[in-house]
Amino acid sequence: MVKIATWNVNSIKARLPRVIEWLKEFQPDVALLQETKSVDETFPALEIGDLGYNVEISGQKTYNGVAILSKLPIDVELTALPGDDTDEQARYIEALVTTPSGGVVRVGSIYLPNGNPTRDDNDKDSEKFRYKLSWMDRLIAHTKDLLKTEDAFVLGGDYNICVNDGDVYNPAGFVDDALCRPESRGRFRQLMNLGLTNALRSFHSNPGLYSYWDYQRGAWSKDNGLLIDHLLLSPQAADTLLNAGIDKTPRGKEKPSDHTPVWCELDL
DNA sequence: ATGTCAGCCGGAGGCTGA
């Protein structure tokens, strides 16, 4: 059994105590991290390596940044999403993981652009939103290529998409939000319609399951959340899916990330 | 409580992104 989790940590340095305690308690075989906000040179790889994890990073100063932590042997395949050589934002890393039974599972850690405009910018079709949509188009194209390999793969991360209104505590307040707009949801459906399986939704179909709660306005204590973190499985990975869920524990701790981990278990 | 957090620059606190 291989346990894979995704977690937007909102700065690996600020979150290191939370990440270390979670790795010790939850014991994922593979952890896909986002928003590490650290260049590779200053990523706390030694502290995490001491817990038995291989650490692979695609980092950037201040913003973004993704990583894969793996107790199992790992080989990096990509440190950027194909399709635009001018894109310098660190939002994708992909690797092959060798499972205990000798199989291979391909994993990707995804930090999909948020797409909402900057403060004081009323242009909801801003450059940021166009970047989000073009990034999703690239993800769809790359996923088509991955499906041709017939590998078992898991694309996990912060998709910055609320798939439907059941994933939003206050849908009326989010109709114009880039996380909920029809263009975003439509592209997410295109991605799923390639034949992917949303691990969590294979076991839990109810609305009101969240992976993110804003730091503001007491969102956590009121359970005013969003479901924006997902583990998407190829057909070959979905064949082996044993269980999936959300680990809300880290969100309730001191100095938490605003996201909490989403996990799945594969019989690989 | 109209109630946040993190990083950057620069050496405080305003700005940005989320």
Image (tube, rainbow, N blue to C red):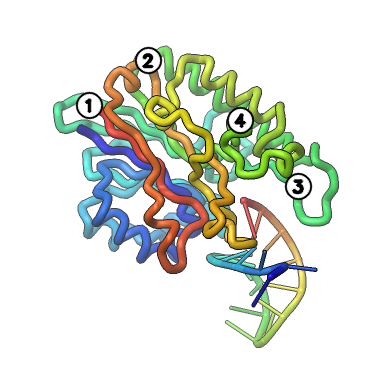
**Residue A164 tag number:** 4
- Viewer-nearest of discs 2 and 1: 1
Answer few, some or many: residues within 10 Å of disc 3's Cα (few below 14, many 20 plus, some between 14 and 19).
some
Chain for mark 2? A
Chain for mark 3? A
**Residue A149 tag number:** 2
Q: What x and y, as percent, mark residue A253?
A: 41, 64
Callout 4 and callout 1 share a chain: yes
Does residue B15 sit above or below A203 in this rendering?
below
Q: How far apart are marks 2 and 1 (CA)?
A: 20 Å
What element does badge 4 sit on?
Answer: loop
Does residue A225 sit above or below A10 in this rendering?
above
What's the residue at 30%, 25% (across, down)? A241
Report which quarter residue B10 is drawn in.
Answer: bottom right
- Dot 2 or dot 3: first in sequence order is 3
- Viewer-nearest of discs 4 and 1: 4
The residue labelled by disc 1 is A267
- Dot 4 or dot 1: first in sequence order is 4
Chain for mark 1? A
- Viewer-nearest of discs 4 and 2: 4
For badge 4, the amino acid type reads Asn
Q: What x and y, as percent, mark residue A218?
A: 59, 62
Cβ atoms at labels 2 and 1 below 8 Å apart: no
The residue labelled by disc 3 is A117
For badge 1, the amino acid type reads Asp
